[in-house]
């Protein structure tokens, strides 16, 4: 029989206060991940400065938030749930992160980045495990998503100059496109896709009106960001996962996912090696370079063989002297010396961590969740929530061919990805559908 997930320890306070506290904390965690501590801080994908010293507001704020959620988790969460994190894949990832810090040329900066990343991951985990039941989790999800939508749509009305892209010398084509409270439309679009997926899940689990509003508001925002690929991956991810319910087997969704992943790899990275594919993309999107990304991919592929096994080090390739000190590429579409990332999760993972560390991270972020999804769908009460988490994984995997967000500190897209990773990890091991109520004389906390 599948273990039940004790979302909160009984007996620590009255049931009503316990439930409300857990819901509020989970909702705040979701809002923090989706909104951040510095909304409406614009950014270009091209930087004229090296490195990222980080923001004091983010560093202090996330440290404080991490402390709050750590205390709440220690007080409310089941020991069995926390113990599930001690798995081979997560332990190997911890080793990879520790080794990256140990060999970093600038340990202080790398430590700051890793600490913020780990705190963000912990908040994502806590947001799932604090509510006492899936119904309470849905209320927290509804509140957090609504807060993010209110922030972005409110910005369009009250501060449109901040909520929309203005003129940028590097990216003039983005003028007038929506970005909401996010730093860039390429962040806003994907995160709004995730919020729309939340809405779909809420509709499927009884919150029809609220879920519909969230779904439609998120989907509209995605269209207004002007991203063709994001707009295409969004419905595709939903259709892939719904195939599990259509055919009654999780394997149908997994096979569709793997086939789609191969097709997207062919039309993105494959376009570097095939003229036919390149011209097909030009006919389809009007731009065979994916807005200059092919230049970055070619450059990345040329640099990976220089340090294939261990990579250049975490956060130690783009925006560092490894790129800054190269000659200006006059023939390239973009001057890659001042690009903040390579616009491809898979290539950037290999550049930073090499094939050894990269294999561990790819397992944690993509392979493990697929396995967990097939296990989670064998638990009848977990199927809808597992579908939601897997839609996010599918979307993130497809988007990874065009964007980079792995281990990206407190980046909203990264946090949503790891939120889904932890969600499937829990859904594969515990029954999430029923609340755990304290009975007199029962002192077991799971």
Image (spheres, helix red, strand yellow):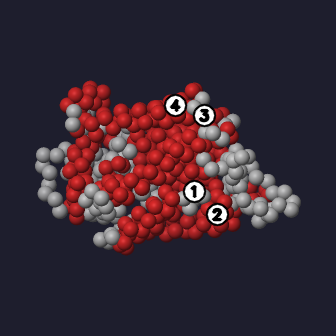
Distance between mark 3 and mark 2 Cα atoms: 31 Å
Query: Label 2 belongs to which residue?
Result: 73
Disc 4 from disc 2: Cα separation: 36 Å
- Up-down: is 347 above or below 9? above
Secondary structure state at the residue bearing disc 4 = helix
Compared with 29, 383 (above or below) is: above
Q: Tag 1, which secondary structure? A: helix
Q: Where does the C terminus fall, quadrant-wise? A: bottom right
- Of the two numbered discs 2 and 1 on the same chain, state the one appearing first in sequence: 2
Please tell me whether mark 1 or mark 3 is closer to you in this view: 1
For the residues labelled 1 and 3, the Cα–Cα distance comes to 26 Å
Residue 332 seen? yes
Tell me which corner region of the image, top left, top right, bottom left or bottom right, holds residue 354: bottom left
| Residue 312 falls in image quadrant | bottom left
Residue 399 spot, x, y in % from top left: 40, 42
Residue mark closest to the camera, 4 vs 2? 4
C-beta proximity under 8 Å, tags 2 and 1? yes
Q: Nearer the viewer, mark 1 or mark 4?
A: 4
Label 2: few (<14), some (14–19) or many (≥20) C-alpha neighbours in 10 Å: many
Gap in Å between the C-alphas at discs 3 and 4? 26 Å
Q: Which residue is mark 4?
A: 252
Q: Earlier in the sequence, mark 1 or mark 4?
A: 1
Q: Tell me the residue that label 3 is attached to.
A: 212
Residue at image position (49%, 69%) is 60
Structural distance between the alpha carbons of marks 2 and 1:
10 Å
Residue at numbered disc 1: 125
Q: Earlier in the sequence, mark 3 or mark 2?
A: 2
């Amino acid at each position: 029989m599948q273990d039940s997930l004790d979302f909160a320890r009984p007996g620590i306070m009255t049931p009503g206060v316990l439930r409300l506290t857990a819901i509020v904390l989970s909702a705040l965690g979701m809002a923090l991940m989706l909104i951040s501590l510095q909304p409406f801080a614009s950014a270009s994908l091209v930087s004229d400065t090296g490195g990222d010293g980080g923001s004091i507001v983010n560093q202090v704020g996330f440290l404080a938030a991490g402390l709050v959620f750590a205390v709440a988790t220690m007080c409310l969460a089941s020991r069995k749930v926390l113990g599930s994190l001690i798995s081979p894949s997560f332990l190997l990832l911890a080793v990879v992160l520790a080794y990256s810090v140990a060999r970093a040329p600038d340990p202080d900066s790398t430590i700051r980045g890793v600490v913020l990343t780990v705190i963000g991951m912990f908040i994502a985990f806590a947001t799932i495990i604090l509510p006492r039941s899936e119904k309470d989790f849905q209320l927290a999800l509804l509140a957090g998503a609504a807060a993010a939508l209110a922030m972005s749509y409110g910005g369009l009305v009250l501060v449109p100059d901040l909520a929309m892209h203005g003129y940028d010398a590097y990216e003039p084509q983005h003028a007038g496109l929506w970005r909401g409270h996010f730093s860039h439309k390429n962040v806003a679009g994907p995160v709004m896709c995730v919020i729309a997926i939340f809405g779909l899940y809420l509709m499927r689990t009884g919150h029809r009106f609220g879920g519909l509003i969230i779904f439609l508001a998120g989907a509209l925002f995605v269209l207004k960001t002007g991203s063709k690929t994001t707009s295409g991956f969004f419905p595709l991810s939903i259709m892939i996962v719904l195939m599990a319910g259509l055919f009654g087997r999780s394997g149908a969704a997994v096979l569709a996912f793997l086939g789609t992943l191969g097709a997207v790899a062919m039309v993105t990275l494959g376009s570097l090696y095939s003229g036919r594919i390149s011209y097909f993309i030009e006919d389809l999107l009007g731009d065979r370079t994916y807005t200059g990304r092919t230049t970055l991919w070619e450059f990345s592929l040329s640099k990976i063989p220089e340090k294939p096994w261990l990579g250049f080090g975490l956060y130690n390739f783009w925006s560092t002297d490894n790129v800054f000190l190269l000659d200006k590429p006059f023939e390239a579409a973009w001057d890659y010396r001042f690009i903040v990332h390579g616009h491809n999760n898979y290539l950037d993972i290999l550049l930073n961590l090499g094939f050894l560390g990269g294999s561990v991270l790819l397992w944690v972020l993509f392979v493990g969740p697929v396995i967990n999804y097939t296990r989670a769908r064998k638990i009848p009460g977990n199927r809808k929530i597992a579908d939601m988490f897997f839609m996010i994984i599918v979307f993130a995997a497809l988007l990874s061919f065009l964007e980079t967000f792995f281990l990206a500190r407190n980046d909203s897209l990264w946090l949503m990805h790891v939120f889904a990773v932890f969600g499937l990890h829990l859904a594969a091991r515990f029954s999430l559908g029923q609340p755990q109520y304290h009975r007199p004389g029962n002192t077991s906390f799971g």
